[in-house]
Image (cartoon, rainbow, N blue to C red):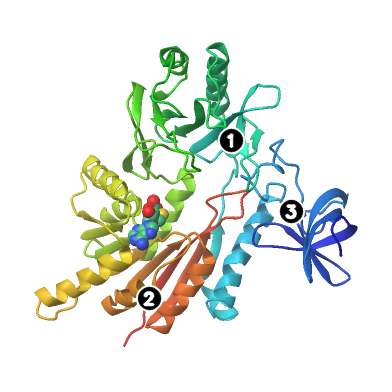
Amino acid sequence: MKKNEIAVVKIEDIGVNGEGIGKVDGYTLFIKDGIIGDVVEAKVMKAKKNYGYARLMRILEYSKDRVGAKCPVARQCGGCQIQELAYEEQLRFKEKKVRGNLERIGGFSSELLESVMEKICGMDNPFYYRNKAQFPFGTDKNGEIITGFYAGRTHQIIPNRECALGRKENEKILGIIVDFMNEYRIRAYDETTGKGLVRHVLIRFGFTTKEIMVCLVVNGDNFPHSEKLVDNLRKVEGMTSITYSINKENTNVIMGKNIRLLWGQTYITDYIGNVKYQISPLSFYQVNPKQTENLYQYALDYAGLTGEETVWDLYCGIGTISLFLAQKAKKVYGVEIVPQAIEDAKRNANLNEIKNAEFFVGKAEEILPEYYENYAREHEGEKAYADVIVVDPPRKGCEETLLCTMVEMSPKRIVYVSCDSATLARDLKYLCENGYHLKKVRAVDMFPNTVHVETCVLLQRRTM
Ligand code: SAH
């Protein structure tokens, strides 16, 4: 097929990025927003030798799994990829994605997976689950201030103040900010000229405490007339923290390095389970608190703690999993590469009067091997001991040096929490070739309407 050619295609499969896949005379077309069962008219945008990418122009026959989009800009916006796919089918897709990777990359048999995979944990309501949103600000061609979300893979702002994944309060807060900017002639930032003040607005909401945080990211050292803005924002019910962050760099990084207080306090408080966390605009915090609690509960169950265990929590971030586990373990060691996250972890431990958690700053693949070697040196060759090791690495998974030390430490159980089932499968293959059994796998839908999926896995040491 050639560029600009138009074809009628039946969508027969779904790709890893949620796109529809169909064939025309053996030639594969990837069609964003096509859903299995649809018959669509599509225009080829990019043609390679054996496959191409096409744009969905018209739906000729609707799939039984197609649902109306909740959000008016669902297709243009880069946030959701599969909002028009029925939620039950989204769950099926995600479970299949995890299973497929474990089979193909991990080399696990389908019989084994059949017996170890537990039902995916979905949400009752797959909307309005996010506690955090970052809205870019800009100006449209009529000179009006706009805010919304970036289109997929670009920095074009799709105006939308009522994202169906975020809190309804966001719309009101954005309205107050846009009105303020219009009244005081404060301009939105322009990436091409580097001029204009307001770049982004970060809004966070504590689901348990109902506390709201607003942080404006500005391209300037001062924030003129900010007291007028504060007067209106503080009237929003739950408003707890109003701050700004200076970012004058020409960069895709959203936040500046420091936070300045405008009103209230610099953080909000929220809970996961019964653990309390202080969250500042720069802290990492899971965006779906409901599913986070479910995910951590699975991790806790898999860890099988009785109160006597020594546990390592590698890639611990602000210590969320560590503190969750510390309540049921003798001792928890957390390791994380970002120093500010470890400061948050220590503060959160104090806040909850948790005394059996200790945190280290550094790379997991350096800290754990060093600890292991030093321990042996200081204890006449005795092995450093762990009952359980939990890992929750970023998408690229764990380095082999780390997996190797984990195997040497030979904990009874390893709990692997993953946001990328391909690297998860690769790492599980290594661990299962070196003394571990795959016992349980549970996918958790942390990000409904997107193609992302989290997985929690239990490995058990083989008896020797
Ligand atoms: N377990 C945490 C965070 C998981 S996200 C939670 O549930 O909240 C993964 C974390 O790994 C991030 O905080 C990131 O900063 C950290 N990280 C990335 N590479 C690392 C490495 N090589 N060693 C240790 N931590 C790392």
- Disc 1 vs disc 2: Cβ atoms closer than 8 Å? no
**85 lies above or below 160:** below
| Number of numbered discs on residues | 3
Label 2 secondary element:
strand
Which-is-in-front pick, marks 3 and 1? 1
Residue picked out by circle 3: 32
**180 lies above or below 250:** above
Answer with the quarter of the image where residue 167 lies: top right
Mark 3 or 1, nearer chain start = 3
In the rendered structure, find residue 280 and report the number of the disc placed on it. Answer: none
Residue 369 lies, in percent from the top left, at 26, 72
Which-is-in-front pick, marks 1 and 2? 1
Residue 309 lies, in percent from the top left, at 24, 65
The amino acid type found where label 1 is placed reads Thr
Spot the residue most to the front.
Answer: 193
Residue picked out by circle 1: 192
Q: Residues within 10 Å of mark 2 (few under 14, many from 20)?
A: many
Q: Quadrant location of the N terminus?
A: bottom right
How far apart are the alpha carbons under marks 1 and 2?
A: 54 Å
